[in-house]
Amino acid sequence: MNRTYPVLGLVISAAWLGGCAVWQTDPVPPPPPPPAAAQLGEGDVPQTVQDKLRRNDQGEPVGFAALDAAEQAVNAAQRTTGVDEYAPEPLKQAVQTLDAARATWSGIADDPLSSPAGLAEVGRQAHAARRWAQIARADARRETGLRQLAIVSNKLDARDAVDQRWAGTMVAPGEFGELVFATGTDRLTGDSMAVVDRVATFLEEHPRYRVQVVGHTDNTPPSAGNLAAFLDDNPDLRDLDRGEQAAAYNRAVSQRRADAVRAALLEQGVADSRIDAEGRGAADPRASNDSAGGRRANRRVEITLVLPPRNTDS
Amino acid sequence: MRRMPIVLLLTCLGLVAGCASNPEPMVAPQAPDESRLASARAAIEEAAAAGAERLAPGPLRDARQRLTAARALLYQVAGSGQSLSDDQQARLEGLVQAATLDARYALSQTQARAVQTKLDQLQAELDAQPAAQAEEAPR
């Protein structure tokens, strides 16, 4: 019994200390992984900078690659068109930083390996000089490009002004002719194919234009047989009254004819994205439906030239 | 043998008590002050937002690597519980300045390439259709 208490005391103390050790925490979060030294480039790691020394046959340092690269970059910037005009400040920074790098280098050139810190400084300055020179060139290219962009945009705007003459023009029926379908069908006649050819040629020569194809019918109701077949294909229309069913039938007919024109244009090589095809049925007559002549005029497919606004986003 | 459960119980209590009485660390847990990296970080974000990932990936990558190196230095020093030495201070500033310049170049290159792309697009549009054609009547 006398030995029990010292043993218990020893066990508890050991456990207490063990508890401390087990739950001891690191007071500072672990650092992020550093990049490989070789990726850092000049100016960051002295050894990396030293590796950029140019040496003669005897292995003696005679130059510094980072400084050479900076000199080439500054020379290139000075020769670049527009730098003087558009990027004088970055160029000035490049020249001044290069001068500083040269001065630092000349102070250690006799024995650069004895001054890793000096080498690192040359590397840092050379990197800055090269970047300023590259910034000067990029800024000059950007500004020169913006100036050219304004010139080209003005030319396109001038062309747009000419192009506008045809915007909104209905060319069929009209200057290009008339689209006619075989009776009771959505098949274009031969003469109508010539109209499609003219439209396709116009679109090829005017790449900004699109076309709006709109099919129309007169208000003549469909025959009982045709309507029955139509309702068989569209049973959800059965609940409508007779007039609404006839209107839906005419819209479907006009849509099929507009789609037929779209298909003919696609065959001529016109991109689908440049064609809008819509069927309006009898909703938009251009003549009275009370006469045969008027109804004939109302059964038509119109093609209108559309010029969308230019996308000027840069 | 009869005392074994008592010994185990006391051992467990000791472990728990050891945990509960674990004193505050000598060095207070504290992440390093990353505000020193703010200029580089802002420049990188600006370049990336302008499209540098696509149009100037090289200098943007350089900028990020230098920023990572600067951050690693900050954490390394913080982990040792000391403040930055003069040399470390100079190295940190050098990395941040270099990263900022890399990002600035990435932004300039991105803008220049974006302008050139738009110019090429409009020039192609202009070349696609001679102006004289537009003045002809639709045929």
Image (spheres, rainbow, N blue to C red):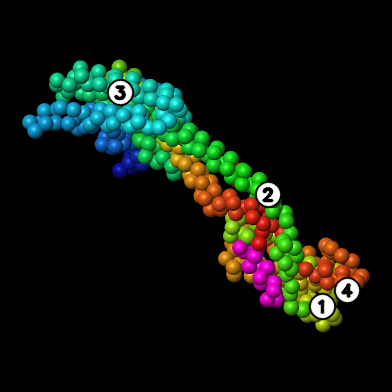
The amino acid type, in three-letter code, at marker 3 is Leu
- The one of A56 and B91 positioned closer to us in this rendering: A56
Counting residues from the start of the chain, the first of labels 1 and 2 encountered is 2
Q: Chain of mark 3?
A: A
Left or right, residue A290 beside residue B135: right
State the predominant SS element of the stretch in magenta.
helix
Which of the 4 image quadrants contains residue A62? top left
Which of discs 1 and 4 lies nearer the camera? The answer is 4
Q: CA distance from mark 3 to mark 2?
A: 55 Å
Q: Chain of mark 2?
A: A
Could you tell me if the residues under marks 3 and 1 are in contact, i.e. CB atoms within 8 Å? no
Residue A272 makes an appearance in the image: no
**Boundaries of the magenta span:** A187-201
Instruction: Give residue A147's position: percent from left, percent from top.
Output: 51, 35
Q: CA distance from mark 4 to mark 3?
A: 89 Å
Instruction: Give residue A298's position: percent from left, percent from top.
Output: 82, 68
Relative to A268, say whether B122 is above or below.
Answer: above
The amino acid type, in three-letter code, at marker 4 is Ala
Q: Label 1: how many residues lie within 10 Å, few (<14), some (14-19) or many (20+)?
A: some
Q: Chain of mark 1?
A: A
Could you tell me if the residues under marks 4 and 2 are in contact, i.e. CB atoms within 8 Å? no
Q: CA distance from mark 1 to mark 2?
A: 43 Å
Quickly name the residue at label 3: A98
The amino acid type, in three-letter code, at marker 1 is Leu
> Which residue: 91% across, 71% down?
A291
Find residue A164 and name its label.
Answer: 2
Q: Chain of mark 4?
A: A
Quickly name the residue at label 1: A227
SS under mark 4: helix
User: Which quadrant is the N terminus of chain B positioned in?
Assistant: top left
Quickly name the residue at label 4: A292
